[in-house]
Image (cartoon, rainbow, N blue to C red):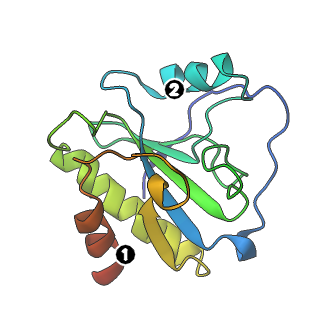
Amino acid sequence: MNIVYPEIAFDGELVPLRLEMVDSIALHDSEQAEGDVYDVDQWFKRRGYSGIGYNYFIHSDGTVIEGRGLNTGDAVKYHDGHVLSVAFQGNFTHSLSMPAAQYRSGVRLIQYLMNHIPTITMVDGHSHWAGTDCPGRYFPLGEMIADSTTKTKS
């Protein structure tokens, strides 16, 4: 799995996750069709967070970018200690489709994380944990969960 490690400066220290406590992956959309990982980082900072709240960010071209990595996220209130957050560039409340490269990278990242953190048993949309429509009604949630949890993992 090729993961890009951008130079993001967090306001404060990140707290490493206790991987044995991580049991889920939450999928998000960034609500921004054009914004890259640095734009998302600034969006979080303008709202008082220490930086991007997602553990990983997948650009529309399929590039997988580390946000907080295996540190405590800040994207699923009350659940960040046991849920990894993966965000996809785009606004799937309005966008009717996800680019194929982005979809494939999402499936591969989920499989990679599940292989490396065997305590992960659940993948769902952000809305599972919070009163939100994230990742949006056009996000291919069911298909992505099925493709990443039922196929042979690599």
Q: CB of mark 2 within 8 Å of CB of mark 1?
A: no
Instruction: Give x and y (percent) for residue 79.
Output: 68, 58
Instruction: Give x and y (percent) for residue 89.
Output: 36, 35
Q: Tell me if residue 27 comes above or below residue 11 in the rendering.
A: below
Compared across the picture, whether 102 is left or right of 38 comes to left
Q: Quadrant of residue 136?
A: top left
Instruction: Give x and y (percent) for residue 115.
Output: 50, 77
**First in sequence: mark 2 vs mark 1:** 2
Q: Tell me if residue 101 comes above or below residue 116 in the rendering.
A: above
Viewer-closest of 47 and 115: 47
Within 10 Å of disc 1 (Cα), the crowding (few <14, some 14-19, many 20+) is: few
Q: Secondary structure at mark 1?
A: loop
At horizontal 27% and vertical 46% (from top left) the residue drawn is 102
Can residue 152 be seen from the camera position used here? no
Q: Tell me if residue 95 comes above or below residue 18 in the rendering.
A: above
At horizontal 72% and vertical 29% (from top left) the residue drawn is 49
List the single residue furthest toward the right. Answer: 13
Instruction: Give x and y (percent) for residue 71.
Output: 72, 51
Compared across the picture, whether 144 is left or right of 5 comes to left
List the single residue furthest toward the front. Answer: 131
**Disc 2 versus disc 1: nearer the observer:** 2
Amino acid type, label 2: Val
Residue located beneath label 1 in the image: 154
Q: Secondary structure at mark 2?
A: helix
At horizontal 48% and vertical 53% (from top left) the residue drawn is 126
The numbered mark at residue 40 is 2
Amino acid type, label 1: Ser
